Amino acid sequence: MLYKTLNQGIQIPMLGLGTYRLTEEQQVIEAIKTAVEVGYRHFDTADIYGNHRQLARAFKMIDIPRQQLFITSKIWNTDHGYNNVFRVYDRILNELETDYLDLFLIHWPGLSRSYLDTWQAMIELWEKGKVRSIGVSNFLINHIKDLEENFKIMPAVNQIELHPFFVDWNLVNYCTQRGIAIESWSPIAKGQVAKDPTLIKIGQKYNKNAVQITLRWHLQHDFIVFPKSGTPERIRQNFDIWDFELTEEEMDKIDQLNKANRIGPDPAQFF
C-alpha cells in the first residue's frame, strides 16, 4: 500500500474503497469484509450517501482496530453554516459509532459563500482534535482562493471528479502547488474506461484490465483514489495493482485521453 502525508500531518492510504450507493446492509458488510481481507484500510463515505449505520455494523464485524482504518465523510450542501457543522459532525460520529473521523470534507462549495462559515467551524473541530484532518470536495480555483484570503489553514485534500477522460490540470496544479492533495472521485468514469482501446491495449502488456490500468495511472500521478464497488471480485481486482508500473510513454498516452468532458455536475453551477 502507498501512503501520502497530508499537509495536516497525517498519512492517508492512497487506494481506498468508495461507498457511494452502497446502502443494502448485507452488501455493505460483504464489501467491507472483502476489502479488509485483501488490504484496504481507507473507506470513503458521505452524509448524503445514507450508509453510515450500515458501515458501522460492517466495521464491527472485522478484526481490525479503529486506529488502522482511515474513514472519510462529508457534510452535505444543506448543512453549510458555522453552527450546523458541529451538530452534523456529532451525528455522523454517532451513526458511524466512532469517536473521530480521519478526514471530514465540505462536499460541495455551493453557489453562495456559506462555505466560509463552514470552513471556520471545521478548522475549530480540527484544532480541538475532534477530527484528524479536514478538506474540501469539488472546490474550483476561485473557491480555494477564497479560503486562502480568509484563513491560514488550508484543506488537506480537494476531492474532485478526475479520470482519464476529464482532468482539470489547472485546478490540479493549483492545489498541488499549495500542498493540497488531490483525491479522485468517479476515477473510472462510471466504468467507461473498461471499453477504451488504449487502456485495453496497455493492459494486455501487464495482464491487467483497463480499470486496473486506470487506477495505476491515478496513483502514479500522485492522486488518492477510491473506486466504488460492492462486488467482491471487483474489489479484489481493483486492489491488485501493485505488481506493475506504467512507463512514461504509457502515462502520456493515457493523459491524451482527456477530453475535458465532465460526467458529474459542474461545481460552478451545482447547488
Image: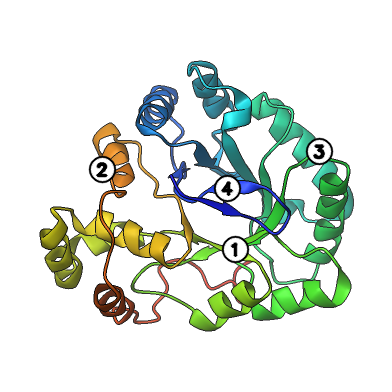
Foreground of the two, 113 or 137: 137
What secondary structure is marked by label 3?
loop
| 42 is higher (above) or lower (below) than 246 | above
Real-space Cα separation, disc 3 to disc 1, in angstroms: 21 Å
Q: N-terminal of the two: label 2 or label 3?
A: 3
Real-space Cα separation, disc 4 to disc 1, in angstroms: 10 Å
- Closer to viewer: mark 3 or mark 4: 4
Task: Residue 266: give x, y in percent of width and height.
Answer: 53, 73
- Residue 130: which disc? 3
77 vs 119, left or right, is left
Quarter of the image with the C terminus is: bottom right
How crowded is the residue under tag 4: few (<14 C-alpha within 10 Å), some, or many (20+)?
many
174 vs 128, left or right, is left
Q: Which residue is mark 4?
A: 12
Instruction: Name the residue type under label 2.
Output: Gln
What secondary structure is marked by label 4?
strand
- C-beta proximity under 8 Å, tags 4 and 1: yes
How crowded is the residue under tag 3: few (<14 C-alpha within 10 Å), some, or many (20+)?
some
Q: Which residue is mark 1?
A: 181
